[in-house]
Image (spheres, rainbow, N blue to C red):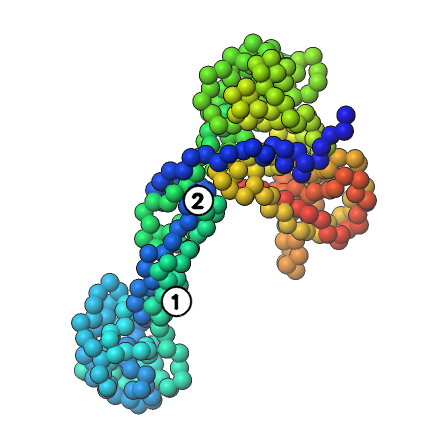
Amino acid sequence: MSLPSVETARTIMLAGIVPLAAEAVPLAEADGGWLAEPVTARRDQPPFDASAMDGWAVRGADVGPGARLEIVGESAAGHDAGVTLHPGQAARIFTGAALPPGADRVVIQEEAERDGENVVLTAAPDTPAWVRPRGCDFQAGTVLLEAGTRLNPWRLALAASAGRATVVCRRRPVVALLSTGDELVAPGTPAGPHQIYDACAPALTAFVRRSGGTVVHLGPARDDEASILAAVDGGAFDLLVTVGGASVGDHDRVKPAIRSAGGRLSVEGVAVRPGKPVWFARLADGRPLLGLPGNPASALVCAELFLGPLIAALQGGLPNLEVDRAVLAGPLAANGPREHYMRAVIETGPDGVRRARPMTDQDSSLVTVMAAANGLVRRPAGAEGLRTGAEVEVLIPAR
């Protein structure tokens, strides 16, 4: 059976994903959320002509070396100066404060000297005005953040500057994680001689949270259909992610269990390395299920390629991968018939060139290799060998 490409499989998975309901979220809790409604400015920012520096508010016509102006007031941030400047007058002013009426520029304090109740200017008429005009950042009615934008600290600052205490985001999806396998035990608990610690559950928990979702744990479940179905039955979640049991061996019981409960599979493997056994289904009630391979590298690479986009789509976001470019730090052999995502160290040198160095051993079970890498080099299916310095596509996960 011919396996779909990564792009085709992702398209199939995302088809029919409906964004979750919208809700008002306090700014302090909105980091990483996806906007369901735009954020629009309710007033100009700044709402007045403001000083960009500490100095003296003056009339431009009065500026010139040796000009002597009468001090008639002071303007500090958050306060009204209470004066209007007339010819020959100045007011002390501080950064962020509103210019008094009549003033149209600021002379910085380094270019003026106070003399009793007067200030003597050394500034030339062509020096900068040091004024932030009203609305120079944004104006009332401007759409500051579009619906579908993912929030980060910088964008939250913009929403706050518009006076918003809350923003309307899609509800964060609840992602249920179900690790399967008789060989798995939770980290920190006694392990038998033929068991291994579950490395995928903690890693995928962190991945889901960084992608904007919340996590519930259903497993681990044993390698039998009854145990798998018992773990899933009655679970409250928006997306189910199973880990392990995804291949075709006698002990890989997850897909048969889902089928027996009325699930409908639409992807049964992808032409990708690592992660060929990844699969996708809809449960009998229509909720999506992503089946990840049990090897940690396979699970996490497929999380980047498929789980992240699914979580974004559930929040009305753009499920696009952020692909960049780098040059190879060493040669690469020709690639095989599957698209290959190679764990790699990606660094920018003193010369400003970003270089990628794929790890020598790409065995999908090696957790040390995964931990040492900070990105993935994408090799298209059937790609020819490449020399040192050749340009490649790289995927750099958020860390």
Q: Quadrant of residue 72?
A: bottom left
In the picture provided, is 254 more to the left or to the right than 95? right
Q: Are marks 1 and 2 in contact (CB under 8 Å)?
A: no
The type of residue carrying mark 1 is Cys
In the picture provided, is 215 more to the left or to the right than 226? left
Q: Mark 2 or mark 1, which is nearer the start of the sequence?
A: 2
Residue at 63 percent across and 47 percent down: it is 323
Residue 216: x %, y % from top left: 46, 25
The type of residue carrying mark 2 is Leu
Q: Is residue 244 above or below residue 73?
A: above
Residue 237: x %, y % from top left: 47, 25
Q: Nearer the viewer, residue 283 or 239?
A: 283
Residue at which label 1 appears = 136
Q: Nearer the viewer, residue 346 or 23?
A: 23
In whole angstroms, how far apart are the C-alphas of marks 1 and 2?
Answer: 25 Å
Q: Which residue ends up furthest to the bottom in the rendered image?
A: 66
Which disc number belongs to residue 357?
none
Residue at 37 percent across and 58 percent down: it is 141
Residue at 41 percent across and 41 percent down: it is 169
Residue at which label 2 appears = 35
